[in-house]
Image (spheres, coloured by chain):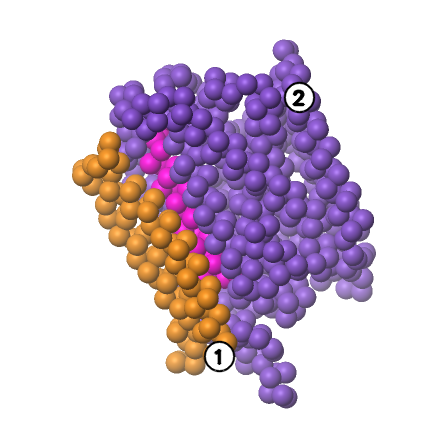
Amino acid sequence: MDIKVTELVITVLYFLFCIWIGVYFSKKAGTGSKEFWGAGQNIPFWVNGFATFSSNVSAASFLGFLGLSYKMGWSFTTIGIGSALAFGYAWSTLLNSGPLRRYSELRGKFTLASFFSERYGHGTGLATSIFIIILFPLYIVPQLIGGGLAGSYILGIDFKYAVMLIASVYIIYVVLAGMKSVTWADFLQGVIMLIFMVGLSLTAFYVFGGWDGLMPKALAIKPHFLDINPKLSTATYVGMFFAVALFAFSSPHIIMRHFTAKNVAHVRGGVALTSFLCWVFHLIGYIGVAAACILIVPDLVKVDRTYIVVMNKLWPPLLRGCAVAGILAAIMSTTGGMLLATGVEFSDNIVRKFIKKDMTDNQVIILSKVVMALVGVITTIMALGETRSIGFLVALLVGGTASAFSMPILFGLWWKRANRWGGLLSCVGGLGVYVVVHFTKIMPFLGEVLISIPASILFMVVGSLLTAPPPKEIQEFVEDLHRHNYMPATEAKKV
Amino acid sequence: MASNHTSLRNPGLHWSLVIAAWVAFSFLFINSPAKWLLGIPVATWLFSIGGLISIGVCLYSIVAMQKWEEQG
């Protein structure tokens, strides 16, 4: 193999820097769950905005989705990914980020499953924890495969070594210092990713003579690049939009970031910033890179290599090395957040809640570090042997997450009448319907959520209305989540 | 029943419905034959601009929601 030394040296230096962040914050971070899972709840909006953006931009964003933009047209990724994320985070700013941030301060909890446990009872909480422990490691695997492929394409090292290199770095910095190091590493990675995607797009426009020089030529080769692709059904466009938007609204590893913000204004500001960054990355970034690739290689077969083709053509080795760091950063930031979510679900929401109730915060953190290391190693081994496509696995898990969690979050925060049966049926039933629709192929690929989300709403409404309303304290708890000073109703009465 | 909906006056909820209506409106044009600006169809254009407008709505609503929550 032809190892590319400049790119490899820059990547290794960048990885060492990421490990240093982990070591630095492991010394600086205090003890206790608020520090480890909630990053001390003092993250400002500009850090959280980039960190959340970075958690969303993954291997698929630089490889698979950009390849889709090249193959299916920029309009497809604009509607199905870029705008979907912008809209999803806009809804999150308006509907769930503020109340959930209040929840974490009121109850000292930092996971979605904890919220569901309090709102809908332990059944829904346990189901959520189990879904996360099963789904998230499966999501980590395609990320690592993407990292391995990117590493082998660009650095010229073997796929297996690339996977092991990336896995060892992100496992170290996640296990060392928890959410604080993940947040700051993700902030840095978010900045790098934005610069190198938008930077390559602007370079392409500059080199090919601006919009008038680039776009008419690209459209002459692929007439549907800016248009709706006639090969794709309307259900695919609509389904992908809602799956991605509701994933941004409800994914547990994104929700965990809401809990780390300084206060409600900062969480809302951070999510609004994420919305903007996702828009810029996918709309401005993709258009130039995908169009340039159409001109450079009009009949590219391995479309996952779109970014690499354009980068190799337009940038010198030094910049290419930095861009490689950007791609690998995308992988580590997503997997880091998911590994953290898996660790806390197992140790806090299953072991402490149901098996060993007298565990201290520190024992829970130690157990979750062991779990995260184990899950990290297991997913690495799975990635080394996995052969399915990255895009397929990611799309499947995005739709499943949206189907299970989005409606229970929305109704739990905004409908006091929603009760434990409604919550449980909506969560388990939503995912169940998604799985059934996917395997029976009633809808085209990516269109499954068009059935599973309405089903989740129906389960919520029917389940809640056919059974008794939730107790008064639960209804007061929902009101507290919308109170500016969020003093619990019981405390407010005393005052 | 009305007591179940005390949060319905929150400006955040109102604006999210406006954004949802924009999304629904945009999808109505998904197969529109109209083409502007080198073939950008109406649906893509509506989604692109809609995303940016949503972000503006969010920035406005952060202040509006805080005021609403302060008033209880």
Residue B11 percent location from the top left of the image: 40, 68
Location of mark 2 (residue): A8
Residue for point 70% across, 37% down: A18
* Labels 1 and 2 in the same subunit: no
Can you give x and y, in whole percent of width and height, for residue B16 in the image?
38, 61
Q: Please tell me whether residue B17 is drawn above or below residue A323 in the rendered image.
A: below
Decide: marks 1, 2 in contact (CB < 8 A)? no
Q: Nearer the viewer, residue A336 or A325?
A: A325
Chain B rendering hue: orange
SS class of the residue under badge 2?
Answer: helix
In the rendering, which numbered label is found on residue B72? 1
Q: Amino acid at mark 1?
A: Gly
Of residues A86 and A479, the one nearer the viewer is A86
Quote the CA–CA distance across marks 1 and 2: 57 Å
- In this picture, is B58 found above or below A371? below
Looking at the rendered image, the quarter that the C terminus of chain A falls into is: bottom right
Question: Magenta segment, which residues?
Answer: A70-97
A73 magenta-colored: yes
Is residue A435 found left or right of A32 in the rendered image?
left
Q: Which chain is purple?
A: A
Q: Is residue A309 left or right of residue A477?
A: left
Residue at 62% from the left image edge and 61% from the top image edge? A262
What secondary structure characterizes most of the magenta part? helix
**Chain letter for the residue marked with disc 2 in the picture:** A
